[in-house]
Amino acid sequence: MATRTQVADYVATKLSAGRSTAVREAAAWLVATGRARQAPYLARDVAKALSEQGYVYARITTARPLSDETRRQIEAFLRHITGATQLELDTQVDAQLIGGLRLETPTAELDATVRRKLAQLVEGVQV
C-alpha cells in the first residue's frame, strides 16, 4: 500500500499534466484507503513535494493591498529563500491584522503582523 508521502510525490508529478486529474486521483485514494480525514495533510505533503521541484505556492495576508513594488520585493525574497523557479502568490487583505504581513509557504510561516505583536505584548503583561 502506498504511503501518503508516496501519493503526494505522485500527485506533485502529475499536476503538470492537469490539476483536475491529479486531484481526482488523490481524492479517490483517500476514500479507497479510508483516509479522507488526512486530506489536509496530503495537500501539505503535495505542496512540500512541489516546492522541492521548484514550484512554491505562498499566501500573503496584509492589512492593506500590496503595492506592485512591495509585491516584487516579496517575490524576490521568496525566490531567494526557497530557491523557487516558479512562484504562485495568493494575496489576501485582512484589516484585522492592523499592519505588517503574514507569509505562509508549505514549509514555513512568518507572522510579522501588528495584531500578533500586540497579542504577544498582552500575554507578556498578564501575570
Image (cartoon, rainbow, N blue to C red):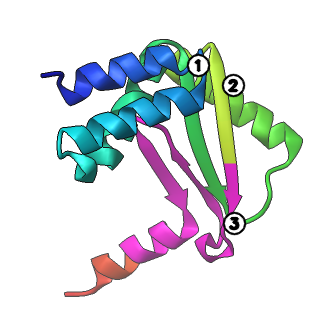
Q: Quick check: 73 left or right of 50?
A: right
Amino acid at the residue labelled 1: His
Which residue is pictured at 87% across the width and 41% down the height? 68
Residue 31 rendering spot, x and y as whole percentages: 27, 44
List x then y, in percent, for residue 64.
76, 64
Find the magenta span and give its range: 91-120
| Residue where numbered disc 1 is placed | 80
Give the residue pinned by disc 3: 63
Residue 83 in view here: yes
Give the SS element for disc 2.
helix
Which of the image's four quarters has the N terminus? top left
Q: Residue furthest right?
A: 68
- In the rendered image, which quarter contains the C terminus? bottom left
Point out which mark residue 76 bears.
2
Question: Residue 57 versus residue 76: which sits nearer the camera?
Answer: 57
Q: Which residue: 37% across, 82% down?
A: 122
Do residues under tags 1 and 2 come within 8 Å of each other at their CB atoms? Answer: yes
SS for callout 1: helix
Q: Which amino acid is tagged 2? A: Ala
Could you tell me if the residues under marks 2 and 3 are in contact, i.e. CB atoms within 8 Å? Answer: no
Q: Are there few (<14), some (14-19), or many (20+) residues within 10 Å of tag 1? A: few
Which of the two residues, 25 or 124, is positioned nearer the viewer here?
25
Q: Is 43 in front, or is 94?
A: 43
CA distance separating discs 2 and 3: 21 Å
Q: Look at label 3 and name its amino acid.
A: Ala
Specify whether residue 109 is painted magenta: yes
Residue 79: where, in percent of width, then height? 61, 21
**Residue at (17, 25) in percent of width and height:** 3
